[in-house]
Amino acid sequence: MDDLYRELIIERNRSPHFRGELEPNDYTFQDENPLCGDNIRIDVRTDDAGFITEAAFSGHGCAISQASSDLLIESVIGKSVEDVKKMTKEDVLDLLGIELGPVRLKCALLPLKVIKAGLYGMGEATDTL
Amino acid sequence: MDDLYRELIIERNRSPHFRGELEPNDYTFQDENPLCGDNIRIDVRTDDAGFITEAAFSGHGCAISQASSDLLIESVIGKSVEDVKKMTKEDVLDLLGIELGPVRLKCALLPLKVIKAGLYGMGEATDTL
Amino acid sequence: MKDCKQFTGDFDTLKAEFPTLWRKVSSGADLVYLDSAATSQKPDCVLQAMDEYYRLSNANIHRGIHTLAEEATAAYENARKRIAAFIGAASSKEVVFTRNATEAINLIAYSWGRKNLNAGDIVVLSEMEHHANLVPWQILAEERDIRLEFIPVTAEGLLDMESYQEILALEPKLVSFTHMSNVLGTINPAKEIISQAKAAGAVTLLDAAQSLPHFPVDVADLDADFLAFSGHKMCGPTGVGVLYGREALLRDMPPFLGGGDMIRKVYLRSFVSNELPYKFEAGTGAIAEVIGLGAAVDFLSGIGMDNVDAHGREITQYAMQVLDELPWLHILGPGADKRGGVVAFTLDGVHPHDVAQILDWDGVAVRAGHHCAMPLHERFSVPATTRASFYIYNSHNDVDVLVESLRKVKKMLG
Amino acid sequence: MKDCKQFTGDFDTLKAEFPTLWRKVSSGADLVYLDSAATSQKPDCVLQAMDEYYRLSNANIHRGIHTLAEEATAAYENARKRIAAFIGAASSKEVVFTRNATEAINLIAYSWGRKNLNAGDIVVLSEMEHHANLVPWQILAEERDIRLEFIPVTAEGLLDMESYQEILALEPKLVSFTHMSNVLGTINPAKEIISQAKAAGAVTLLDAAQSLPHFPVDVADLDADFLAFSGHKMCGPTGVGVLYGREALLRDMPPFLGGGDMIRKVYLRSFVSNELPYKFEAGTGAIAEVIGLGAAVDFLSGIGMDNVDAHGREITQYAMQVLDELPWLHILGPGADKRGGVVAFTLDGVHPHDVAQILDWDGVAVRAGHHCAMPLHERFSVPATTRASFYIYNSHNDVDVLVESLRKVKKMLG
Ligand SMILES: Cc1ncc(COP(=O)(O)O)c(C=O)c1O
Ligand SMILES: Cc1ncc(COP(=O)(O)O)c(C=O)c1O
């Protein structure tokens, strides 16, 4: 547990750096984890070259999904849309620095699912990351 | 097994005394044991006072159901229709003089089911003897 | 068969019968199992009954003549008789085995529903239903254009019986509702609801998945037409549930699944259905599981459902009392006098998933989420709750460990 | 988990793994189990796998966060993966758990069938189908006015492939047939039948209830769209079966049973289905049974399905040879080279029920009746047959005991 709720996660859950909504935006997507009802929306702004200049998340969820959202957004700002599309489960787990069981994994990965679905312009987020 | 296939049953299966069909008849009914496909028809003739004067069975089935049919018919001839309606499972088992597991019990009781259904004028034989 | 030890009247000794309860969780803490509303633990005698079937009498049933087949058939049908007696059914013909309560409800929706419900007909449910008693009717509503009406849930977490009267005035064809909410714990006045439904001309289906494990449920006394429950929530195995149906109703219903055992005769292009209850049991049944459920029913009868009930009430009352002392914790649903052994709550500022995770660290197994009752959570404007549920093997000490651990959660994340 | 002993290549030692096979029947004779086509016996390791789940990790799955729920979920989903690999499925999303093969076929009839079949559409079956692959289509035919066509069975007991071509010319929507007959033993040329069906534009469903336990079955190689089988016939427990479906087809199908787990979201009046395979698994699944089936698949893989096949062929050949020497015994179906380990026969002048009963006295467990294939028996103008079926634990000696006992039957009743 000490692993799971390390200081960084507790901190980012309590005081996220990137909470909010961006209107207008270039990409936006929202999805839910049907297992728990965690609901995350991510808005993204990009420059003409396809680099992410701003991003923010809203919605509600557990500490893991909140911290994961905040850390993910921090990591994608400045990256190209194409690079973010290539991000994997491992990238997110590296950001969090923890190991997770299958159920909580879904919490941690929800923001990645959401941002990728937004960037790909999908109708629905899928579990195939 | 020696119990189950005692001489009487083997004998009555091999050479039944009451095999055949009666046309015309006063009562007739036919039914099947869905578990095994045993199929028994019993025809009955009665006198004006409601006593059974003649009866016969046809169809096919295992030694137990054949012997049971033959012995049952032997026992009902001379009885009143009302008395036969009251016959029970135990009466049949007494005739056969054996004990039976649940599956073979259905074989033994098929003729009783058929004759009672015929006498009651039912559309379908039931398992509630 | 190895019998469960005879019940001494002392619930503290019962825990010994449940092998799972003696383990530790991944953190090394002792397990405190407070998730029985999801599935109960199984006593040794239930596992032994299944093992004995598999190791001694394993055979397919009904059609077999050989020794094993006869033994297996007898064990299976004997279990059906004891289960029928346990719920007060008039005959074992009224007990149909399904996979779970969910399939039992679906069977009614598919067979009874498709025969008896037409466009515009009304089916009454409630806002506190488990998805198992919502989705089958939604599928049917979409297909047949029937109307669904919902008995509202009051702020206290009770069914709004006044609104129910208004709905009954619409002359519904079916009233299908849960005997006990798996979230609020609310025990609904089933007898009253059923008798009013009957007076209005409706058929009734009682979802007893949560009630049957916890207190005496008698279909004759309740006068229910249909009743559904699952084995796995009442000390029985997974893979088996029961649909009870009044014989006259079952008799009039068309078959649901087709295949072996549910037929009397089969031709290439038609078939004749078998008699009850086999008409509704297609293919090889859950033989070992039915035998296991029979043992579970014996086990519960051995304790006595009145005792099970009393113990459940006592522990729920204690839990409500100590949880009420935590100002940052909010319990959904009514007071202890109106509920069974289920307590769902929210914590200020902490998501239920985090609660469950940290509790697990202390060995406390609770459930977090919507507990398959999303509309009910919507009704109370919470996306998810944490749920502790109690059963015969739980003690005051388990509640104390829960409270201690909740304090820790609050300190850490709240 | 206690592993089954590693297979040594010697089938004689396999019997040691099956506890049931060491008992005596009611007469006192040693059991000779020749009824595996009805249900197979279970090896110790399968029973242990289930027991271990119940005694250590018993919890409801998918929604739980606590240690037990995570362990149970992992064990369940891991079993799904191994079962998917065992049948050559592209993904475990294509493996849907049902109660048995019968429910799997019904699921297709209800979900795929009601979506895709309309009045006048043709479904092709065969005359050698088990009731499980007849009745669901008869129910649908009645409801939707679809037409059923049957591939005839030749006097030898094979599918008449010429007639099949004529039926395909009618452009059927579905061809659903058994891979191996549970009466004739016939192994049908599934690959050929499927490729011809596809060429004619039909979807295909293979009933693998008898084939999968006996020889390698690979859905990719067969190119089957759907495949159904039961755990209990392949060393697994009762209460679990599998529907394999091609992902694209499953995706397009509406849900069948409604309830927990098969949903993504539920509102009072509507729901959103969950992703595959959960969309088709409503309510609490047969958790222990799926874990047991996973262990069964490991057990069979440990032996090697090629070895299982070779042993089955060898023993069937021997049985056919010695039974052929009895002039008053008549075997239904083709020669040993075209069949799996099933031999059904009639005895001159003796009813199959009596055969089975007297054989039981000698410890020999066989089945008598129509074996859930009444139309096939009608085809061969016999009301019932006696069936001996063989599996991995049977030996030449078992066949010899059978033959000895049959002679006795003939002498006694013939
Ligand atoms: C060919 C065939 N199909 C289907 C089934 C039905 O299997 P289950 O009863 O397990 O659903 C059987 C089993 O008897 C069978 O032999
Ligand atoms: C009230 C209620 N109804 C129905 C069900 C469904 O039970 P199962 O999943 O065993 O079908 C549950 C179990 O979660 C329940 O709590």
Image: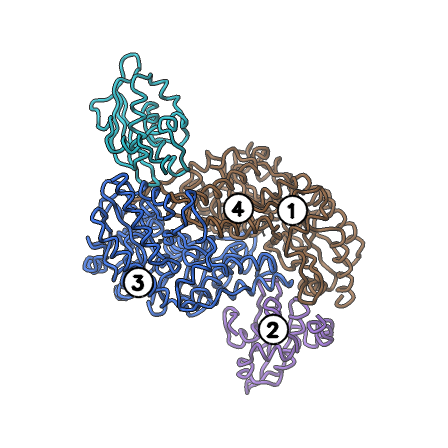
Chain colours: A cyan, B purple, C blue, D brown
**Left or right of D96 in this view: B58:** right
**Viewer-side label of 4, 3:** 3
Q: Nearer the viewer, mark 3 or mark 1?
A: 3
Q: Amino acid at mark 1?
A: Val
Q: For marks 4 and 2, give the CA distance.
A: 36 Å
Q: Report the front residue among D266 and D355.
A: D266
> Residue D13, which numbered label?
none
Q: Residues within 10 Å of mark 3 (few under 14, many from 20)?
A: some
Q: Are marks 4 and 3 on the same chain?
A: no
Q: Residues within 10 Å of mark 2 (few under 14, many from 20)?
A: many
Q: Report the residue marked by disc 4.
A: D148
Q: Chain of mark 1?
A: D
Q: Residue at x 65, y 46 (%)?
A: D153
Q: Chain of mark 2?
A: B
Q: Label 2, on which residue?
A: B42
Which residue sits furthest bottom?
A: B49
- Give the alpha-carbon distance from disc 2 to disc 1, as whole Å: 34 Å
User: Between A81 and D340, which is closer to the camera in this rendering?
Assistant: A81
Task: Give the number of marks.
Answer: 4
Q: Which corner quadrant of the image does residue C241 belong to?
A: bottom left
User: The C terminus of chain A lies in which quarter of the figure?
Assistant: top left
Image location (x, y in percent) of residue C273: 50, 59
Tag 3 subunit: C
Q: Given the image, on which type of amino acid does mark 3 rest?
A: Glu
Kindly tell me whether mark 2's CB lies below 8 Å from ligand 1: no
Q: CA distance from mark 4 to mark 1?
A: 16 Å
Residue C314's disc is 3
Callout 3: CB less than 8 Å from ligand 2: no
Does the image show residue D317? yes
Mark 1, secondary structure of its residue: loop
Residue ID at (64%, 63%):
C67
Residue furthest top as drawn: A49
